[in-house]
Amino acid sequence: MAEQQYDAVIIGSGAGGGAASWALVKKGFRVLTLEAGPHYDPSVDYKASTSKWEQGFPYKKGSIGQYSFGKMQSLSNKYDDIRSWNHISGRLNKGGNRVSYGYHHVRGVGGSSLHFTGEAHRLNPRSMKMNSDFNVAADWPMDYKELEPYYLQAENIVGVAGPAHDPYHPRSAPYPCSAHPLSYTSTLLRNSFLKKGLNLIENSLAVLSKPRAGRLDCNYCGCCLKGCPREDKGSIDVTYIRESQADSNFELKTGCYVTRIEAAENDQVKGVHYIDDRGSHFIKAPLVIIAAGAIETPRLLLASKSDYSPTGLANESGQVGKNFMETLLWTSSAMHPKQLGSHRGLPVDSICWDYNAPDAIPGVIGGCRFSPSVGESDLLGPINYAQRVVKGWGKSHKESMRKSFGRVISLTGISESLPNQGSYVDLDPKATDTNNQPLARIHSYVDDMAIKRIQFMSKMCRDILLDSGARNIFEEFSSYDIFSSTHVFGTCRMGKNKNTSVVNEWCQSHRWKNLYIVDASVFPSSGGGESPGLTIQALALRAMSKLIR
């Protein structure tokens, strides 16, 4: 039987891979997308409407990648005030070194959009010139205006709901859907922000506020992170991938773990080696587009070294795996005297951007954002209340549970993460995965400027909660002593200088002309707390438009 011929092979079906496949298939390209993880059926696999709803996202076999971690930094007593703790269990990290709670992602059709809260953010335009303006990180090789049309396109595809007036991110057209109404908890927090002269506005979310394109509108169950069975959340599988699958030019294969990209002469890659449950395979590819994320993409490139590329594919600059940036956050959770019903509503329905600009925090380089986080702290149901909120046992515990449930109020700050010499991804020299491939090894270091951002966020979260009327902060979570990332960036930086970057402004390898990377690994800077999904989509759509032309 003759081998199927494709114009492009895409590795990964998350934000970048889904957007890239959609763009190419629409223009008649024959596309094969290889996904290492499984497919999820929203109506079957997600448990929001069952008694098992509180158990979290339903990870399947193969839906979590394998990684290792380098030695973590030691902790200083002078920063005890920003360590993670809970009033029942004490310090969450009881040791003297930073520890890892892991890189939280989903390997599957749709990638981590399957368990994201739907946040759909544009990058602050000023965050794209961090090197020119602040002598840190690197500049993006394009400006906000060049990316703006692709932001619009992505927002329309996934159905973003946002405020009628957004003073923080310039727009050439309104959001496709009107903003979601604020929950009672967010209304309470907004008053506290106003006391400080700050604005808590409606968040921009890829969650439908009205039915659209065969998808229902949101019912505000709050289970976005556990998988959305109604498909009102604009995850990549029910938007880009579903539209691509309606076209005969598109093929998707799941359970396919790519082990190596083969290089050839004339600065071209030849094709892709992968493993599935039937064995090992090689497929030729005129175009190879990597969208495996900022951990797996550098792993794959470093593992693809050959006589043509002895230090790793596309690593002529030595920058593959460098410039790793992570989620830097602070969360405070407290009890409120009022019955808030805080388990209801969208997990992150509101947001404060007032400190998002790179110089908005006094004496600090790199901004941050603030948003309510009861859902993201997994404090929606009685199991977590019983383990983390309410002390005791027996009858008195049950009575306290009844009085306490729905009264938790949480606030989170997420900040800029900037590259440093101690944060990078390489290949583990000893550990291998189930396919006998070297693991990606994550090295993470929180530097002095990052600590200052965490200190600022901790003070703001505590102050805002107290101003809202809350008392008895019972839990705080900090990136100072615990690595716990959902968003990771920067390990295959884009740039115009081939000596300091991995891909150019079109996400194309400087050397290997038929090799593209369209995920958050290409980000030169992380932004001041923005969720990266929409920017990944916009970058992929922009890159594919140039490729098609």
Image (cartoon, rainbow, N blue to C red):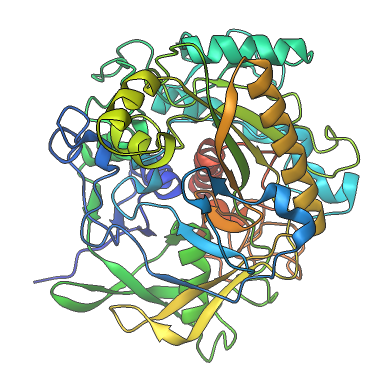
| Left or right of residue 141: residue 22 | left
Residue 328 image position (x, y, % from top left): 64, 48
Q: Is residue 492 above or below residue 338?
A: below
Residue 245 image position (x, y, % from top left): 22, 41
Task: Locate residue 390: give its quadrant.
Answer: top left
Task: Locate residue 241: give its quadrant.
Answer: top left
Of residues 79 and 508, the one nearer the viewer is: 79
| Left or right of residue 464: residue 508 | left
Q: Is residue 302 above or below residue 448?
A: below
- Please give the name of the residue rendered at 61% of the width and 63% of the height, measured from the top-left corner: 492
Of residues 255 and 392, the one nearer the viewer is: 392
Q: Is residue 349 above or below residue 390?
A: above
Residue 525 image position (x, y, % from top left): 70, 50
- Please give the name of the residue rendered at 71% of the width and 60% of the height, measured from the top-left corner: 446
Determine the residue located farthest toward the bottom in the rendered image: 307
Of residues 219 and 273, the one nearer the viewer is: 219
